[in-house]
Image (spheres, rainbow, N blue to C red):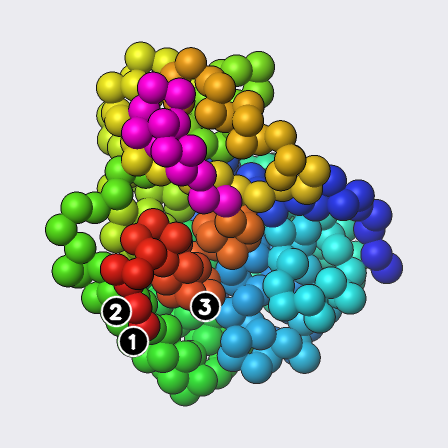
């Protein structure tokens, strides 16, 4: 059974899930102690969790995924149980899972409460936007699937990759000041503050998030943006925007007078890749660092 979803809805789901917007947090600890009692039929909810399952070589266990699980491409052939923050218990349970891997922030709460009482075991995977958070995800998923040895090996590889990435910008003397803009609908800028995936990836890439006065994603005033003096604007790519977003952005009265506006400095990257905080995050951070610092960063 496959639940219908449009391309636009899927892109929106991936984007919102990646940034952690409108989250409804579940318990941070697993709802079961250790491994699934039967890890043969798993529903994976959360793009980074699904990527970890594939990185562990355990994709044969998957019987369904959510709309934010779009990588690797092979996962798209699995039944889609809906957007992770708008889950229907009936949809998740319709594929008769023996276990559910659930990224923290999935919801709504009522749906999660129903899933916790279902016959299938449920493991909630905490979502933190730093190196330690990624390694914890790998450990929890590996334990749930009873492949701790594989998880230990993957975690070691990812850890080394992340540490090497952090070293790439260790010698940078002037760190770029970055403003992540989620949207500018109606001329109003929605920007990323602290405690967000955007803040985390900017730090991993050796940049400075210019918004440190609030947590999460909030609307910012023109004055606040001008005062922040970003060197670079960072945004996610979305279909159909490429031809006009630059002109609209740099004509904005808050952006135009900033160093980023004057230099027309805009970096755009795929949202799931940039903000997923999974096995590909080191690569995403390297790509962002290269975009920020050019020849100053070499592998």
- Foreground residue among 123 and 202: 202
Could you tell me which residue is drawn at 41 percent across and 87 percent down? 149
Q: Which residue is at 46% across, 65% downward?
A: 280
What range of the chain is rendered magenta? 256-268
- The percent coordinates of residue 172 (x first, y second) are 17, 55
Given residues 27 and 292, the one toward you in this image is 292
Q: Which residue lies at the image location 37% right of the left edge and 14% below the top edge?
A: 222
For the residues labelled 2 and 3, the Cα–Cα distance comes to 13 Å
Whichever of callouts 2 and 3 sits on the residue coming sooner in the sequence is 2
The secondary structure type at the circle numbered 2 is helix
Residue 279 marker: 3
Residue 231 sits in quarter: top left
- Residue 188 image position (x, y, % from top left): 49, 16
| Residue 207 seen in the current view | yes
Residue 121 in sight in this render: no
The alpha-carbon separation of the residues under discs 2 and 1 comes to 5 Å
Q: Which residue is mark 2?
A: 163
């Amino acid at each position: 059974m496959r639940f219908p979803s449009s391309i636009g809805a899927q892109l929106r789901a991936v984007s919102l899930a990646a940034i952690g917007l409108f989250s409804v947090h579940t318990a941070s600890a697993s709802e079961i102690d250790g491994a699934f009692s039967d890890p043969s039929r798993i529903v994976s909810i959360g793009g980074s969790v699904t990527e970890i399952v594939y990185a562990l070589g355990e994709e044969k266990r998957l019987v369904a995924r959510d709309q934010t699980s779009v990588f690797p491409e092979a996962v798209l052939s699995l039944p889609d149980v809906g957007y992770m923050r708008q889950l229907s218990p009936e949809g998740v349970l319709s594929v008769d899972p023996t276990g559910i891997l659930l990224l923290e922030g999935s919801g709504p709460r009522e749906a999660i409460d129903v899933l916790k009482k279902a016959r299938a075991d449920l493991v909630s995977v905490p979502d933190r936007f730093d190196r330690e958070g990624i390694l914890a995800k790998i450990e929890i998923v590996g334990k749930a699937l009873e492949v701790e040895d594989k998880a230990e090996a993957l975690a070691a590889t990812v850890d080394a990759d992340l540490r090497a990435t952090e070293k790439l910008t260790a010698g940078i003397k002037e760190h770029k000041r970055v403003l992540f803009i989620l949207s500018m609908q109606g001329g109003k800028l929605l920007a990323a503050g602290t405690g967000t995936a955007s803040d985390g990836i900017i730090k991993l890439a050796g940049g400075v998030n210019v918004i440190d006065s609030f947590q999460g994603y909030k609307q910012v005033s023109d004055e606040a943006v001008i005062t922040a003096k970003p060197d670079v604007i960072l945004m996610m790519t979305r279909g159909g925007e490429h031809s006009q977003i630059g002109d609209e952005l740099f004509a904005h009265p808050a952006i135009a007078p900033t160093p980023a506006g004057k230099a027309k400095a805009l970096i755009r990257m795929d949202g799931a890749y940039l903000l997923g905080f999974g096995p590909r995050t080191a690569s995403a951070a390297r790509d962002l660092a290269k975009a920020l610092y050019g020849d100053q960063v070499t592998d």
